[in-house]
Image (spheres, rainbow, N blue to C red):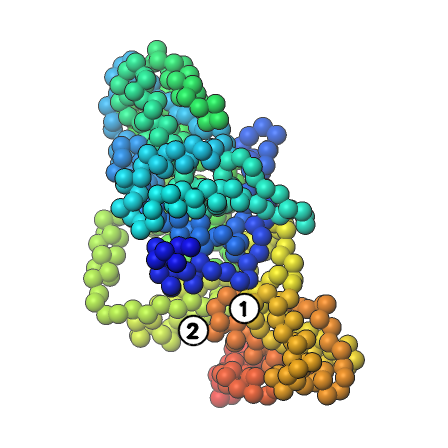
Amino acid sequence: MLKQRKYITSQEAKEMKSYNTVAPRIYGNPKLHKEGNPLRPIISSIGSPMNSLSKFMADTLKSAYNTDNKYYVKDTFQYAQEINDFEIPDDHRLISLDVVNLFGNLEKSKIIEVLKLEWNNIKQHTKIDMELFMEVVTFLLENNYCTFQGEFYRQVFGCAMGSKLSPILAQYVMDHQLNLTLPKLPYTVLILKKFVDDLFMIVPETEIQLTLDCFNSLCADIQFTLETEDTQQSVTFLDTRAYRHDNKVKLKWYRKNTLSDKIIHFYSDQNINVKINTINQMKKRISKICHKSFIEEGIRKLHHILRENAYPNSMLKKLLYANSETQTGQTEEQNMTTTRTHYASYPNITNLTGKLKNVFREDNVKIAVYNQKTIRSLYTKIKDPIPTPLQSNVVYKINCENCDKCYIGHTSQWVKSRMALHKSDIRKYPERCALAAHAHSLDHHIDFENVEILKTESNYQKRLIHEMININKEKNTLNKKTDTNKLSSIYSYLLEKLEMSGFYDGPVDE
């Protein structure tokens, strides 16, 4: 409909059209900082049928959202810039308000009402008329479905955490709530900052409870909890603790008690530059968000955390207590180079990746190193796995039931769709591929029910290389020799050496 009415281009319609999607899957992350460790339900919408449409609508609303409004906080840095050294009258106090389950309590009719009120601004960022725009948003909100252990569920109230549309809808609704609430307060709010569902406010001490009651009186679904100053005259907001000291607000770097303080360990298999950059960026963050009177304390705390992760004391003294201005000047000088720089990424392989980086050092090629073993691989999978027939963008292997041969292929389609094509080729077009020719000519049966996924890769060229590598490694394949013609001789050489004696790190001409 959007394309037919020329609200979107053919290219946009093509990008939003999907043919190999999977149903959203629900899982939960425990809230370790709350009593009983309740689960936070999250719906993974990656690769779902409406993911692209949700992103399109979310991008439109983001472009129309007024980030210059007086409540909005982009990040901790902006908040720190505006709050540090803010002067407070003697009778005012710091408080923070937090919405209870904001996404889960966003009611559809309320969302549509707010968007209609904001339409004069939204329409400047879209060609879609208001009626159809609201219809699309309603359609997305009413189809918050997901799967769990093979069963389908639909969220009948609220927005799904995990949807691309939910965060920006929450921004609009929260701003609307603030616009309705603040005029009802019997005083002028000195400052109010909002980050999604968290509010930081400076209010008269005698009006704290009235403020909470006023915020909770407008909507039964959107209710706030209150945090007041502790014994140190401070409250937390984002990753800072705001102190009221000498009638001014001063921010300190804050870490929750539930944080383990585990970062990249010094003896982990990571490039040394990654570890150095970790130290520099954490130091930079502390320097930017902390009040000047708390920066030194923040650096000492960071020093302690890094020492707990085995970083040498000599390295930390050099990096944490070096002259920041000198480092900044060097960085700016490096950024002034006009020569075009090319970027690439390589896995971190001991005794090899470093040599590759040195080879390209003089050619303005910067190589980003990544680890093949990720943190994700260390933890239990909490999402339901995608069934093999519904997986896509994969390299797969299927065996012949009547002999010891196998076939390796790749596809961007669902596996079940690709298997259906193989079955059709065996019956009608046996000349299309080696698998069909083998099964048709010898009357062999292929084990289509037990497809093995060798690799998942969305990039076509990378997937093609993975297919050729796996064909090359397999002894008894049905694949034609031409299937690996495009595999570089370098890959073939390395694979041969790897098979003979493990990883080989000598000169090619040995």
For residue 254, side relative to residue 80 (left or right) = right
- Residue 412 is tagged as 1
Residue type beneath disc 1: Ser
Residue type beneath disc 2: Lys
For residue 253, side relative to residue 33 (left or right) = left
Residue 125 image point, x, y percent: 29, 48
Total marks placed? 2
- Residue 231 is tagged as none
- Residue 355 is tagged as 2
Q: Report the residue that reaches farthest toward the right.
A: 402
**SS type, badge 2:** helix
For residue 405, side relative to residue 31 (left or right) = right
Q: Report the residue that reaches farthest toward the front.
A: 5
Could you tell me how far apart the alpha carbons at marks 1 and 2 are, in whole angstroms? 35 Å
Residue 274 image point, x, y percent: 41, 57
Above or below, 321 relative to 363: above
Please report the residue visible at 45 percent of the width from the left and 55 percent of the height from the top. Answer: 52
Find residue 38 and report its image quarter.
top right
Above or below, 345 relative to 180: below
